[in-house]
Image: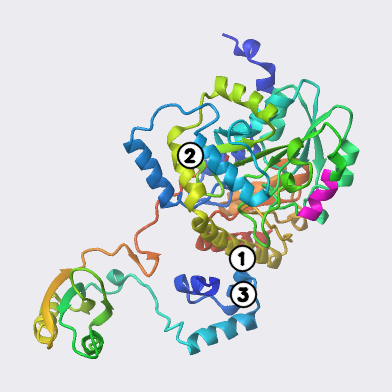
Amino acid sequence: MDYSKILSKKAVALKPSGIRKYFDIAAKLDNVISLGIGEPDFHTPWAIRREAIKALERGKTIYTANAGLIKLREEISRYISDRTGVNYDPDGEIIVTVGGSEAIDLAVRALVEPGDEVIIPEPSFVCYKPIVELTGGVPVIIDTKEEDCFKLRADDLKEKITPKTKLLILPYPNNPTGAIMTRQDLEPIAELLRGTDIMILTDEIYSELTYNRKHFSMISLDGMAERTIYVNGFSKAFAMTGWRLGYMCAPREIVKQAVKIHQFGIMSSPTVSQYAAIEALRNCADDVENMVSEYDMRRRYLVDAFNKLGLTCFDPEGAFYVFPCIKSTGLTSDEFCERLLYSKRVAVVPGTAFGDSGEGFVRVSYAYSRKHLETAIEKIAEFLEEL
Amino acid sequence: MDKLLKLLRTNARLSNAELAVMIGSTEDEVARQIKEYERTGVIKGYSTVFDEEIVSKDYVRAIIELKVTPKAQVGYDDIARHIAQYPEVENIYLVSGGYDLSVTLRCRSLKEVSDYVAQRLATIDGVVSTTTHFFLQKYKESGIMLISEEADERIMQ
């Protein structure tokens, strides 16, 4: 059978993730020291795992409500309210999803019509563009710059707004750059969008992982919650990637559409994970604090180490990545990563995997032990000397 | 716990410069803080965790559970102080539960442990009974894993 004739053109047109390519190369080599992973190296805190075991023992193995366990939605509501001052009604304004990724997918599918423009600041996580393209939407890219610490600037946004603009994706704290948006950074963006029909999708999956200051959310600004879809999840904050659990908080009309799409595509998010997540939100603030403190030490170590090696590195205040500039080597991001991988067996991800504006940078994850990071830095130092 | 202590606990050989970078401080401030910790007795000393099995095989470690009758005025301290003076004793703790003092011994042979317990510990005035547990395998010590870590199964995606 000639499958090329029958496959969906939109599916075929999707490019595989640029991160994956390096994994495939690395997988063929021995003793690779990876700095490429985008998930915590910590185990899920024990209290959360224990709740999951309890749920299994009690036979909690059936579907939940489509929108998720009401108890979990109540905890999410309280948690968001504590952090942002915004109150979402657990009954109708919150949906529990399969990771933050599903929430992003639902948000885009609930809003975007073919031809609608979706503004995406880059470098950013690899999923936004493909998800928009699958709905027939048109991704409109804003290249953020190192001199702006990879923040989204209102002037740049203004230039890209057209009558067709439906949605702005706000991916902060940012993967891969580690950039954050402060209240002062967000205010001009909010000012620009107030009074328009443009919605914001704020992806705050890394909101617990900020270092010099607490995270500030777009929804906390006056009049913004009504035009914002808030996405978060358990993967990064609580080291729960494999549990596949996230959530969306948004105006009732939007959540209503999202619940329908979720109902037909997913039914309900994993039940055992949902019971465990209640414990995460109730009792695991100390565990999160300990992980953040450990990430911060690694972050400071890496920023200093890269700057000393001459690969200048701006101070990333969020997530668990540093984004050093490799332009001084004269190599492209792709060349740098490939040569480093083949000659020193160290895997980092080229900035270009996260958008064209990532050229000249590489993403280095510090979801690794300090010892592992030190070994990798020694190898990178050797690599630079031999260039 | 203070970040500085957290770092030193797992690696006391980090330089002040390295410590300063990781906690976002200065070298001078780190030096001052460590001195202060030493002066006030927060930091009691620095030791090295190494795999003794590789260095020498001829040693035996054991935990001795001691039930004792506390003495008037001084309670358990007097007995603990007496036991602590022996070089074979690595750790000594007063614990809650079925017995009172937990003593870790490091000796050259089983015989030496049993002699030590029979002749030195059991004979102390106030010691009611002893139970000896020999160490079979060490997995983790002072927060440091002595067995190989699990393989990293995470995938770049």
For mark 2, give the secondary structure. helix
Q: From mark 2 to mark 1, how far is it between C-alphas? A: 30 Å
Q: Residue at x 63, y 11 (%)?
A: A6
Asked if badge 3 and badge 1 are on a common chain, one would say no
Residue B18: horizontal and vertical position, in percent?
Answer: 59, 73
Q: From mark 2 to mark 3, how far is it between C-alphas? A: 37 Å
Residue A66 is left or right of residue B50, and the answer is right
Residue A156 is left or right of residue A254, and the answer is right
Tell whether label 3 touches label 2 (CB within 8 Å): no
- Find disc 2 in the rendering and name its residue: A243
Residue A171 shows in this picture: yes
Q: Residue at x 35, y 41 (%)?
A: A54
For mark 1, give the secondary structure. helix
- Find disc 1 in the rendering and name its residue: A301
Residue B39: horizontal and vertical position, in percent?
Answer: 49, 90
The chain under label 3 reads: B
- Find disc 3 in the rendering and name its residue: B20
Asked if badge 2 and badge 1 are on a common chain, one would say yes
Asked if badge 2 and badge 3 are on a common chain, one would say no
